[in-house]
Amino acid sequence: MSLRRVQAELEKYGLLLVTDSVIPSVAGLVAGEPIKGSWWSHPKSLAIFAVIEKLDDHEDVLLTTLVLNKQTFVHTRFWRDLLSVAMTKDRWQMDGLSKDDRALLERVESEGEIRASRTKTELPSRLLVRAKNIHTETGAHAKVLQSWRASAKEKHFRFRPKNPAAAKKALESIVGQWQENFGKKVTLPWQGRGREG
């Protein structure tokens, strides 16, 4: 029942946070209440985890760092918008990027995806790459940085670029609706880097 409810909310909005204490999120929907702090300490944490895993595996869903610099599920109908913004290498993405991050970006784009050997990188928060978790051979979790072209290929998505300004407006309309409905400032990477809980 929880998975169906979460999928319905994702289809309704097009975006859905993994967790947030105010705006719609997987953790809040599964728990049936807003969660402040870590959802891992909630009594329904195992159910929340199970829904996140199933949603992450769904063919019409992509998980990336997006709204409020948090993990956000993106429905397939907004993938074209997301990739059209992410693949521009606009000033907000590239200005002030460290030498190490530039080298890492070049490597990810060249190889398609790499296991993250260092934890501190701005690439996902600037939408330059997609960060995802994988299960290793030992059963542990590891972070992988993936190029947007590799993400599109993995999801069997034929990407046709859209005007980036129009793509931004499509995504901004969703978060604007949340701001209006829930009274919380909600940002996308090009609007600001502040993280709100």
Image (cartoon, rainbow, N blue to C red):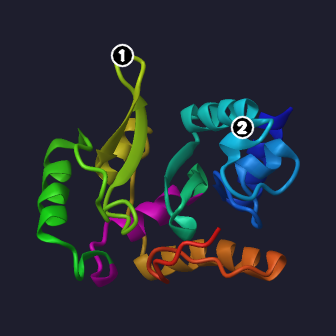
Reply above or below: 107 against 142: below
Q: Secondary structure at mark 2?
A: helix
Residue 1 falls left or right of residue 147: right
Q: Is 90 contained in the magenta span?
A: yes
Reply above or below: 34 against 92: above
Question: Looking at the picture, which amino acid does disc 2 mark?
Answer: Ile
Mark number for residue 138?
A: 1
Give coordinates of residue 28: x percent, y percent.
Answer: 78, 51
> Mark 1 Cα within 10 Å, few/some/many (few <14, many 20+)?
few
Residue at position x 66%, y 34% from top? 49
Give coordinates of residue 175: x percent, y percent.
Answer: 66, 74
Q: Is 25 contained in the magenta span?
A: no
Q: Main secondary structure of the magenta part?
A: helix
Residue at position x 68%, y 56% from top? 37
Q: Which of the pair 89/165 is nearer the observer?
A: 89
Reply above or below: 33 against 46: below
Residue at position x 19%, y 58% from top? 105
Q: Quadrant of the N terminus?
A: top right
Give coordinates of residue 135: x percent, y percent.
Answer: 42, 25
Q: Which of the pair 67/194 is nearer the observer?
A: 194
Question: Looking at the picture, which amino acid does disc 1 mark?
Answer: Thr
Q: Quadrant of the C terminus?
A: bottom right
| Snapshot quadrant of residue 36 | bottom right
Q: Secondary structure at mark 1?
A: loop
Residue at position x 36%, y 40% from top? 143
Residue 29 falls left or right of residue 66: right
> Mark 2 Cα within 10 Å, few/some/many (few <14, many 20+)?
many
Magenta span of residues = 78-92
Q: How many marks?
A: 2
User: Which residue is label 2 attached to?
Assistant: 48
In this view, the residue farthest toward the top is: 138
